[in-house]
Amino acid sequence: MAEVIKMPLLSDTMKEGVVAEWHKKVGDKVKENELIAEIESDKATMEFESPVEGVLLYHADAGKPIAVNAVLAIVGELGEDISAYLNESTNDNATENAPPNTDVTPIPEPQAVEVVDTNNDNGRLKVSPVAKSMATENHIDIKKVKGTGDDGRIIKRDIEAILQTTETKVVEITPSVTIVPPPVETIPIVEPTTQTVAPAAQATEQIRTAFTYIGTEQYNDVRVSQMRKVIARRLTDSKNTAPHFYLKLTVNMNEAVKFRQAINEFSPVKISFNDIVIKACAMALRQHAAVNSSWLDDKIRYNHHISIGMAVALEDGLVVPVIRFADNKSLGQISTEAKDLGAKARDKKLSTPDMQGNTFTISNLGMFDVEEFTAIINPPDACILAVGTIKEMPAIENGTVVAQQQMKLTLSCDHRVVDGATGAKFLQTLQKLLENPMSLMV
């Protein structure tokens, strides 16, 4: 008996999936737990292994949405009849997509209208309403059109034929620049004592006509991935539902720069500034439970554990793997886990548990030299921290202008949960930890 493989539920919010790539084709033998496809869920693209062994007798088309629990593939014995399974799937889809009322009242074909033609022997022409409308819109003399319909009736295709023969055809031209040199006499040569110059209008016209640009407008449409669809929906909901406000603060990173350089001399793993920020945020959240919380409509959840979501940018969108219990982990542990999660994200191997359970999120664009930005809150968190690059800037210390390594932070807060003073106090604590990084070792 053939085994029907259905589209799996790869996340708690997934409603449909898309096969990004099939690694097996119909007729191939597959083993149990062998990779056969990559499936786009609403959160990531994941590898899918066959739960059974046999011959792949059918698989759904790649690139098309497939509802959860719909037929993804059928595995059985070579030559086995699977039409019953496919018909059942087709009937189920037809039932789900059938319109509530299938009674359709037929629309009668428009009758031809008569137009007086003084050049015709019988004085009248038969013209369909569509043809008459098209002729009027395109300024075509209907009396000069030869009809090909019944009894010489002028119909739509007659007007289209005229438009095709008279319309200027667009020929795609490789974009290029044609330089038309101005005549030698364009700029008059004047004697040094002469103050006469070419009129401004004439000079402008010379510049305008000197270059002629010829090209074509081009574009390509790309299907929106499942991940991008969900990102768009969730962030739109977050922005429209949660009343955002933003708090900005600049941190003196001089000591953090020295601290990182010193610790990397003996650390078995390289510590990044992002690792330091994650650790500092986790420790600051210990003191500010309101920031480490979630809005749940009829209640506010204050989390006692601290799990930091780490935004990672991919070609298809943004994923947020989670470093759990970050406040209890060392910088070395955080660095190792962050690197592992980042690699899994780029290789599209993140599991659903890897992306669940965040209580606070950090989005860092410092590696792209972005100085500051605002981020949209990542539900269910009440806050998200946007981290900019570290940049040397002039600052005043003890009345003297000195060079200072500065980093700008922007905290986006859900005003339903976090008040301005609460968010500000959290940022002050975070600033103190980053400016005194030895405290992260306590």
Image (cartoon, rainbow, N blue to C red):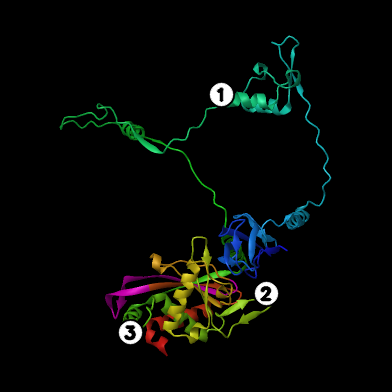
How many numbered discs, if any?
Answer: 3
Q: Is residue 244 magenta?
A: no
Can you give x and y, in whole percent of width and height, for residue 54 in the image? 64, 64
Q: Which stretch is magenta?
A: 379-406
Q: Are marks 3 and 2 in contact (CB under 8 Å)?
A: no
Report the front residue among 49 and 191.
49
Q: Earlier in the sequence, mark 1 or mark 3?
A: 1
Question: Residue pushed farthest left?
Answer: 192
Q: CA distance from mark 2 to mark 1?
A: 64 Å
Residue 68 in view (yes/no): no
Q: Which residue is mark 3?
A: 266
Q: Are marks 2 and 1 in contact (CB under 8 Å)?
A: no
Can you give x and y, in whole percent of width and height, for residue 230 in the image? 60, 63
Q: Earlier in the sequence, mark 2 or mark 1?
A: 1
Q: Residue at point 52% right, 74% down?
A: 361
User: In the picture, which quadrant includes the N terminus?
Assistant: bottom right
Can you give x and y, in whole percent of width and height, for residue 212 in the image? 38, 34
- Looking at the image, residue 151 sits to the left or right of residue 164; the answer is right
Q: Secondary structure at mark 1?
A: helix
Q: CA distance from mark 3 to mark 2?
A: 48 Å
Report the front residue among 226 and 370.
226
Can you give x and y, in whole percent of width and height, for residue 222 in the image? 54, 51
Quarter assignment of residue 5: bottom right
Report the front residue among 3 and 130.
3
- Looking at the image, residue 382 sits to the left or right of residue 333; the answer is right
Q: Which residue is mark 1?
A: 166
User: In the picture, which quadrant includes the C terminus?
Assistant: bottom left
Q: Residues within 10 Å of mark 1 (few under 14, many from 20)?
A: few
Marking on residue 37 = none
Q: Residue at point 57% right, 24% down?
A: 165
Q: Which residue is mark 2?
A: 297
